[in-house]
Image (tube, rainbow, N blue to C red):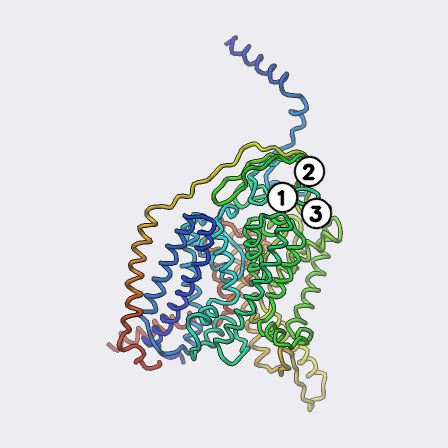
């Protein structure tokens, strides 16, 4: 039985969504300052306007629904899902004001793509956008990777009783330390340390590659944020091709892999448990699936003779595969090269890699290595049970930070989420095919959106059908929040209408 | 009518005399990024002409220079100019506040370049600046300034209520 929805429920949801919105408004200060530094006055004005509008909405929400009650699990789920939608719309204002988005829907597509660390974009004339807007695009992926709620928890909300539930609603369900604010702080500490290292290394490589020093470190920061957050954006439309640099691609690939690892794994390694790298189920799963899908990619590329030698095949093929598997979406080839040269088998290999995706509680998307490992171990345990004497008790285990017992409930819950992912992949692909896109292209793009990867084979363009844009936005949103909070939001809306009807009948 | 025909014949003759024959005969086809990516196999290894705006960074390397040329909306191609090829002075490169020089490159297109580990690029044989870049106006719009002031005033009022007038019944509601 679904419980009734009370006014206080709306207060709690409104209040916390308001606080998160204020956080988004404050975040826009970074691109505004960037624009001021580069003397991009019109762009700075756009961000100023956007900041004030976002803060106004946030403070209004917080004011009218102010409460001291803390969120329960249902509220937390609804807050997470709703705040992502509010953030998507308000963060799209600078895009719209810049004139580089053809419509608010296109701008929302780009911001949802940014927050969900997808990396698909509909922005027009990307090669001529301001540094401020470029900073905003990459900051969205950086914050989205860590989680908007995690950011709000760190700086605005504090150690509320419902804090951990809020993080769970956003897909960050690893309890690194007992205090929720400290979990958020740990996540940000890890990310910020990597930001400094990544920006420095990539900036220096950019300078040695011939870039202007004053811009090199900005590019370093952009590419780091894109890689670490498994976002996939880049400041220019050629993406990684712009730099013509093997060292930058290599370093970026390292950060993609690091970003795709579970925060709990990072925390374990940082606190001295280095052996965890060798035993963690997600690392084992990631290694196996990378080797499998890369083998498939090599077969496809060699069959068609796409690259002239093994070095070229490895540089292009492995980079694209890692980019797909970590759900980053950075690219060192043109989008249409997938269709024109890689062919169906090459695209299939990348589609499978994207679908599997990164680790749980990471910045990445997809099924997640943890679920793949659990399902695989579940199958193995079932086979062992069948082969063992009837009286034997067969128990499966998997290693994640500690040895965990594999229960039927764990396997079922992993399988349910995987089925839901498959469902959104198929729905997106079917809509694409209805609009006339070839099956391989439609699946590639749909899986890319649903797994928050962002590689494109050319389907995602401003001219694509409106419905397809909306479907991809929903796929990105659901895929990033891992369904439950989105379903809870839908259920909450339905329950609200039911409660309203009951009130009317009673009156 | 006769005068007109005579003028045409004279003009054509003059053109044939002034323009060297090999220029007309060997001018490689002008292609776009879309042409090269969509029909990469058919252009592979051929000499092409490519025209585009020089993007922000001209990347000087030990063996040559990389330029990225934008030839349309989200469409650009990497051009490698080897040390042996004369590189003209690029005065303007693309920026938010500038339009980069437009250059015409004649070079060999590589679908998957051996020298650059599979990169899709053009190796230039000649580079000519065909149009100088310029500054670009990005004026602050006055109506946005007005909106900024109006919204800022509204925000100040809301923030005043939020921080100075906590509602008396704040937190007295029961947990649902």
Q: Secondary structure at mark 1?
A: strand
Q: CA distance from mark 3 to mark 2?
A: 14 Å
Asked if labels 3 and 2 share a chain, the reply is yes
Picture quadrant where residue B84 is located: top right
Location of residue B27 in the rendering, given as x and y in whole percent from the top left corner: 65, 29
Q: Tag count in the figure?
A: 3
Disc 3 packing (10 Å; few <14; some 14–19; many ≥20): some
Image spot of residue A463 (x, y percent): 49, 48
Left/right placement of residue A255 relative to residue A424 reads right
Instruction: Check disc 3 and report its element: helix, strand or loop.
Output: loop
Q: Which residue is mark 1?
A: B78
Question: How far separated are the C-alphas under marks 1 and 3?
Answer: 11 Å
In depth, the one of A132 and B34 nearer the eye is A132
Q: Is residue A285 left or right of residue A234?
A: right
Task: Read off the chain for label 2.
Answer: B
Look at mark 2 in the image and give the residue it sits on: B108
Specify whether residue A422 is in view: no
- Tell me which numbered mark, 1 or 3, is placed earlier along the sequence: 1
The circle drawn on residue B116 is 3
Which SS class for mark 2? Answer: strand
In this rendering, do the residues under marks 1 and 3 share a single chain?
yes
Chain letter of mark 1 equals B
Output the chain of dot 3.
B
Give the farthest residue toward the top: B2
């Amino acid at each position: 039985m679904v419980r009734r929805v009370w006014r206080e429920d709306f207060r709690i949801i409104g209040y916390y969504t308001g606080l998160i919105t204020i956080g988004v408004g404050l975040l826009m200060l970074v691109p505004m300052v960037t624009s001021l530094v580069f003397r991009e006055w019109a762009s700075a004005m756009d961000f100023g306007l956007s900041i004030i509008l976002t803060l106004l909405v946030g403070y209004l929400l917080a004011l009218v629904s102010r409460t001291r009650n803390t969120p329960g699990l249902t509220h937390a789920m609804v807050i997470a899902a709703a705040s992502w939608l509010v953030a998507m719309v308000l963060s799209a204002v600078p895009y719209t004001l810049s004139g580089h988005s053809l419509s608010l829907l296109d701008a929302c597509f780009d911001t949802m793509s940014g927050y969900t660390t997808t990396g698909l974009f509909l922005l027009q004339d990307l090669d001529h956008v301001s540094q401020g807007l470029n900073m905003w695009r990459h900051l969205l992926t950086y914050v989205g990777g860590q989680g908007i709620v995690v950011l709000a928890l760190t700086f605005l909300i504090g150690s509320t009783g419902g804090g951990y539930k809020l993080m769970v609603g956003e897909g960050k369900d690893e309890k690194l330390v007992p205090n929720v604010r400290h979990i958020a702080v740990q996540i940000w500490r890890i990310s910020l340390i990597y930001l400094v290292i990544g920006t420095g290394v990539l900036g220096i490589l950019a300078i040695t590659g011939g870039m202007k020093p004053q811009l090199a470190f900005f590019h370093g920061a952009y590419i780091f944020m894109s890689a670490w957050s498994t976002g996939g954006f880049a400041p220019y439309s050629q993406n990684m091709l712009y730099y013509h640099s093997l060292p930058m691609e290599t370093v970026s690939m390292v950060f993609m892999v690091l970003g795709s690892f579970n925060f709990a794994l990072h925390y374990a390694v940082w606190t001295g448990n280095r052996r965890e790298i060798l035993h963690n189920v997600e690392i084992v799963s990631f290694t196996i699936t990378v080797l499998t899908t890369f083998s498939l990619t090599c077969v496809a590329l060699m069959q068609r003779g796409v690259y002239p030698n093994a070095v070229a095949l490895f540089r292009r093929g492995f980079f694209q595969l890692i980019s797909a598997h970590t759900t980053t979406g950075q690219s060192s080839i043109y989008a249409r090269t997938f269709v024109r040269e890689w062919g169906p088998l090459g695209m299939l290999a990348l589609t499978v890699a994207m679908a599997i995706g990164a680790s749980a509680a990471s910045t990445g998307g997809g099924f997640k290595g943890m679920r793949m490992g659990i399902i695989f171990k579940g199958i193995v345990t079932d086979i062992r049970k069948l082969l063992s004497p009837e009286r034997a008790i067969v128990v499966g285990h998997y290693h994640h930070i500690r040895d965990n017992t594999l229960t039927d409930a764990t396997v079922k819950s992993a399988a349910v989420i995987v089925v839901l992912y498959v469902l959104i992949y198929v729905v997106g692909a079917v809509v694409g095919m209805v609009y006339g896109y070839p099956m391989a292209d439609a699946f590639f793009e749909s899986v890319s959106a649903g797994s928050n990867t962002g590689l494109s084979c050319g389907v995602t363009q401003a001219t694509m059908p409106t419905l397809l844009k909306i479907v991809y936005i929903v796929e990105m949103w659901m895929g990033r929040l891992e369904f439950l909070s989105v379903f809870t939001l839908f259920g909450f809306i339905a329950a609200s209408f039911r409660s309203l009807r009951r009130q009317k009948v009673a009156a | 009518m006769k005068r007109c025909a005579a003028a045409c014949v004279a003009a054509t003759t003059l053109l044939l005399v002034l323009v060297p024959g090999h220029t007309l005969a060997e001018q490689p086809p002008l292609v776009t990024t879309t042409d090269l990516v969509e029909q990469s196999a058919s252009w592979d290894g051929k000499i092409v002409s490519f025209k585009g705006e020089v993007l922000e960074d001209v990347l000087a390397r030990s063996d040559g220079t990389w330029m990225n040329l934008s030839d349309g909306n989200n469409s650009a191609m990497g051009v490698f100019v080897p040390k042996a090829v004369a590189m003209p002075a690029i005065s303007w490169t693309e920026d938010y506040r500038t339009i980069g020089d437009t250059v015409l490159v004649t070079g060999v297109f590589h679908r998957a370049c051996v020298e650059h580990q599979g990169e899709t690029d053009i190796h230039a044989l000649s580079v000519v600046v065909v149009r100088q870049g310029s500054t670009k106006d990005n004026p602050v719009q006055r109506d946005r300034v007005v909106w900024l002031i109006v919204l800022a005033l509204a925000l100040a009022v809301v923030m005043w209520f939020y921080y100075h007038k906590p509602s008396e019944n704040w937190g007295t509601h029961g947990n649902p």
